[in-house]
């Protein structure tokens, strides 16, 4: 009955208490039934005196007073002893009453078991329906507000080269730079994408030294409505879609018409520096390309 259900410790305590009461009632009924069971023989054991004390007893006087064929407790008439068999003993009414109590006790125990189990299940179900405040958000989410720390996280990240667009000969490679700001369940990202056209199959570590041709820099700003945030301890994961624009020579932004699926994971590494910043590590997926966050060039800090 309780399988697959989240039952609280209080419910188990209630069920244990009910079962304890059932055990006590069973013992009491059993002892009472045994005490009411009469002595079927009505005779004392051999070798004991009339007061029940052990030892050698001369039973000659008892034999003369109660010859064979007589019943204990009845005075015998003078004369010959009767040889007829004694009448059957009277029914043990008190034993019958004791046996009659057993079905009633069994019914009471069954009723108490049903009531106790039902109460435990109801109490456990009500407890399971209440969601604790600390886990009311997304699965695995840890809220910094509960620990008393500043929930704001600011990160400046530099990502290694990734393939932004494959071409017939070579690739268009991007070397993303991100500024991340997160507070609780919300976040915003400023994305800068320096791009290069390279005659290689993969993005080189240094595009200038590899002879890649520089292209326009693309930009994207993602606000709280554009991002989904998942927090697991110090680790942040952001998912959204980045629509890029260009800003040639400082002019007004011009949409490129390209929208990239973005997934960023970032977490602090190492001990805090004197200014409170820490190294950052993680990974960025942008479009079809993936590249790691460069830890030696990326920082993360708490607070404004």
Image (cartoon, rainbow, N blue to C red):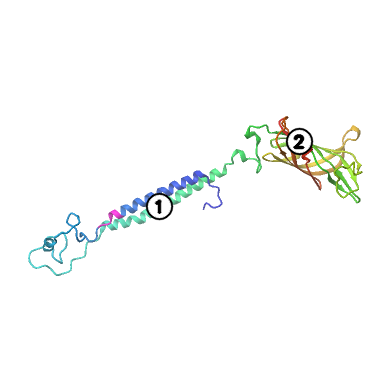
Give the image location of residue 187, x and y in percent.
73, 36
Determine whether, in the image, residue 174 is placed left or right of residue 143.
right
Residue shown at 42% from the left, 48% from the top: 20
Residue 37 colored in magenta in the image: yes
Question: According to the image, label 1 marks what residue?
Answer: 109
* C-alpha span from label 1 to label 2: 68 Å
Q: Quadrant of the C terminus?
A: top right
Determine whether, in the image, residue 150 is placed left or right of residue 203.
left
Q: Which mark is residue 291?
A: none
Give the camera-side residue of 272 and 155.
Answer: 272
Circle 2 Cα neighbour tier, 10 Å, few/some/many (<14 / 14–19 / ≥20)? many
Residue at the far bottom: name it: 83
Give the camera-side residue of 257 and 203.
Answer: 203
Specify the principal SS of the magenta part: helix
Residue at the far left: name it: 79
Give the mark, 1 or 2, whose residue is nearer the N terminus.
1
Residue shown at 34% from the left, 50% from the top: 28
Give the camera-side residue of 292 and 128.
Answer: 292
Find numbered disc 1 in the image and state the secondary structure of the residue it sits on.
helix
Q: Which residues are magenta?
A: 34-38
Question: According to the image, label 2 marks what residue?
Answer: 299
Give the image location of residue 47, x and y in percent.
19, 60
Q: Which quadrant of the view contains residue 104?
A: bottom left
């Amino acid at each position: 009955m309780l399988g697959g259900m989240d039952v609280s410790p209080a419910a188990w305590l209630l069920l244990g208490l009910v079962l304890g009461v059932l055990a006590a009632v069973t013992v009491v009924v059993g002892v009472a039934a045994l005490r009411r069971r009469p002595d079927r023989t009505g005779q004392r054991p051999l070798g004991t005196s009339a007061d029940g004390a052990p030892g050698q007893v001369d039973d000659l006087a008892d034999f003369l007073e109660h010859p064979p064929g007589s019943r204990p407790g009845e005075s015998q008439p003078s004369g010959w002893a009767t040889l007829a068999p004694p009448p059957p003993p009277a029914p043990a009414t008190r034993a019958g009453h004791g046996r009659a109590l057993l079905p009633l006790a069994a019914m009471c125990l069954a009723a108490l078991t049903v009531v106790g189990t039902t109460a435990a299940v109801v109490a456990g179900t009500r407890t399971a329906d209440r969601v604790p405040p600390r886990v009311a958000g997304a699965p695995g989410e840890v809220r910094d507000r509960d620990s008393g720390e500043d929930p704001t996280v600011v990160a400046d990240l530099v990502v290694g080269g990734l393939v932004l667009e494959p071409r017939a000969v070579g690739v268009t490679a991007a070397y993303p730079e991100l500024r991340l700001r997160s507070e609780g369940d919300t976040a915003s990202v400023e994305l800068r994408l320096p791009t290069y056209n390279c005659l290689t199959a993969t993005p080189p570590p240094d595009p200038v030294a590899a002879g890649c041709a520089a292209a326009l820099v693309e930009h994207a700003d993602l606000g709280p409505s554009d991002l989904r945030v998942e927090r697991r301890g110090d680790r942040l994961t952001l998912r959204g879609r980045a629509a890029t624009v260009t800003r040639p020579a400082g002019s007004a932004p011009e949409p490129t018409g390209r929208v990239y699926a973005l997934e960023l994971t970032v977490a602090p590494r190492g001990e805090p520096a004197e200014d409170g910043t820490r190294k950052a590590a993680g990974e960025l997926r942008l479009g079809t390309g993936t590249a790691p966050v460069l830890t030696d060039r990326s920082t993360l800090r708490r607070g404004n």
